[in-house]
Amino acid sequence: MYEEEDSYKLSIKCGKNTDSIEKLEELCRDKIEKLIEIIHIPENTTIHVPCWTSNAFAELICVGHIRKKGDGTIEYELDNSESTL
């Protein structure tokens, strides 16, 4: 069973409201992959990282769900179901 962890209070800002959704998702994927390399995630834990545009009136692009399994492997998915674009 995985624990849900929102206490990290992380968020990512990238791209602009005028960028295509494909470009924004690619930017988010790149940022999430870089984040995975530098943060510590306890085993069997999932963290949720919102990805926002960099504009003054930021829009939610997607939420990255990063999960560390019991064997130490890390996987992630981008969920754009809550996007405000």
Image (tube, grey):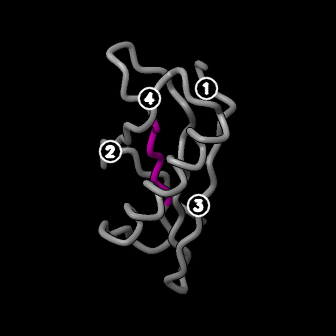
The alpha-carbon separation of the residues under discs 1 and 3 comes to: 17 Å
Secondary structure, mark 4, is: loop
Secondary structure, mark 3, is: strand
Q: Main secondary structure of the magenta part?
A: strand
Neighbour class for label 2 at 10 Å: few (<14), some, many (≥20)? few
Q: Quadrant of the C terminus?
A: top right
3 and 2 marks in contact (CB < 8 Å): no
Residue 73: where, in percent of width, then height?
Answer: 54, 80
Residue 38: where, in percent of width, then height?
Answer: 30, 69
Q: Reading the chain from its start, which is encountered first: label 4 or label 2?
A: 2
Q: Amino acid at mark 4?
A: Thr
Residue depicted at x 31% and y 46% = 7
Q: Which residue is disc 1 drawn over?
A: 83
Q: With 81 as the anchor, is 56 left or right in this view?
A: left
Q: Which residue is disc 4 drawn over?
A: 53
Neighbour class for label 1 at 10 Å: few (<14), some, many (≥20)? some
Q: Nearer the viewer, residue 68 or 13?
A: 13
Residue 27: where, in percent of width, then height?
Answer: 51, 47
Q: Amino acid at mark 3?
A: Tyr
Q: Tell me which segment is drawn in magenta.
A: 46-51
Q: Reading the chain from its start, which is encountered first: label 1 or label 2?
A: 2
Quadrant of the rendered image containing residue 42:
bottom left
Mark 1 or mark 4: which is in front?
Answer: 4
Q: Reading the chain from its start, which is encountered first: label 1 or label 4?
A: 4
Residue 76: where, in percent of width, then height?
Answer: 58, 61
Secondary structure, mark 2, is: loop
Q: Which residue is disc 2 drawn over?
A: 10
Q: Nearer the viewer, residue 72 or 80?
A: 80
Q: Which residue is disc 3 drawn over?
A: 76
Q: Amino acid at mark 2?
A: Leu
